[in-house]
Image (cartoon, rainbow, N blue to C red):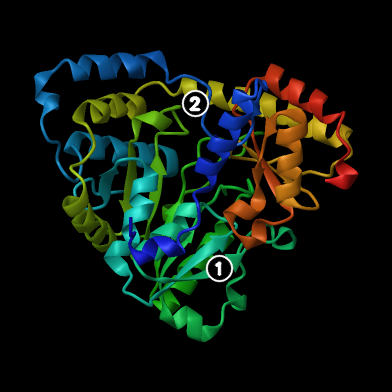
Amino acid sequence: MMYAKRLDHLPPYLFARIDAMKAEKRAEGVDVIDLGVGDPDLPTPEYIVDALCEAARDPATHHYPDYTGMLDYRKAVAVWYKKRFNVDLDPVTEVLALIGSKEGIAHVPEAFVNPGDIVLATDPGYPVYKTSTLFAEGELYNMPLREENGFLPVFDDIPSDVAKKAKLMFLGYPNNPTGAVAPREFFEEVVDFARDNEIVVVHDNAYSEVCFDGYKPLSFLEVDGAMDVGIEMHSLSKTYNMTGWRIGMACGNADVIAGLGRVKTNVDSGAFDAIQRASIVALTGPQDCVDDACRIYQERRDVLVNGLRELGFEITAPKATFYVWLKVDDSMKFAAKMLNEAGIVVTPGVGFGENGEGYVRFAITRSIERIKEALERMRGLDFETS
């Protein structure tokens, strides 16, 4: 079979390889503790599930949905953004329904990137930033995220000729995989940089509601001028434990939304109306479930961080996301050692980009009991030889 040449440039999708490794170990009879992929183990709240069941029984939801999303869904998104971030959105022109934010991230370069155009992306970063650029035949320029800079890109380090050629910028805070957060001043700098260089900003804000210690992450769209230069991708996946439902939203600049919408009308048929109806209930209903989930994740974070410190690791507890970013000597060797000798899955940082080398990512999407068991297994490992 002869595949298209563009596939030769795609790296193997990190989480698909991790799934294969897990399956191999389980086939050997190993009790694998999966702290790798960030898929919430908490169930979708029952009232949202009930809303889906009711909507799915309505024959009106069984037809092709609107390409841009039900207007009622887009209105609910606008109301949620106003209440949560004090951001005003026109649900007709500034909100677009997505089949999960990953889909929107994957499609947006098709609207704005010509072959050879430069796309700026954080490194380490969500792997789809890179693959979507490659599918659009763009050239990726990595913006390193380093601990000494708070895992924020330094725009002064980007050569002026690169900045002038860039068409698109991917970034996301709270950050996957580092767990870092960004202050308002950083987003103001993003706006200025994007305006000066005529760059479309795509901010990935999927983790804004998974936050701890009283911290509340910002929306990029809160910052003056952000609506002029870009959009924000968001999702119900992490907020309401709805990863498998595949529902999200793109919000922001009307021209950027329109461009992404034109791509989507040609490649998909929209999100299932019953899921959109249930999502309206999620966005407009009681938000206690979000607070409850954050309390659970914070307890897990504390158990994992304290346990790693007891094992001799230096680590900073994240203010948001359900990821813990741990510095190690060699990410692949460390991850292999954890899986082969302790039956624990962690994600090697290099899988998120070359600047992720020297770190591994733990996901706190397992119970406290399983996290404690993982820490106990780690006590028997010699990390000096990892």
In the image, 274: left or right of 216? left
Q: Which residue is mark 2?
A: 290
Task: Find residue 171 and report its horizontal and vertical position in percent.
Answer: 50, 58
Task: Find residue 369 and report its horizontal and vertical position in percent.
Answer: 70, 17
* Residue at (86% x, 29% y) in the render: 379
Quadrant of residue 57 within the rendered picture: top left
In the image, 103: left or right of 29? left
Q: Nearer the viewer, residue 369 or 95?
A: 369
The local secondary structure at tag 1 comes to: strand
Q: Nearer the viewer, residue 273 or 210?
A: 273
**How far, Cα to Cα, is label 1 from label 2?**
33 Å
The local secondary structure at tag 2 comes to: helix
Task: Find residue 234 and report its horizontal and vertical position in percent.
Answer: 40, 44
Q: Which residue is mark 1?
A: 142
- Which of the two marks, 1 or 2, is nearer to us in this view? 1
The answer to whether any part of residue 314 appears in the image is yes
Q: Tag 2: Cα neighbours inside 10 Å, few (<14), some, or many (≥20)?
A: some
Q: Specify which label sits upstream in the sequence, 1 or 2.
A: 1
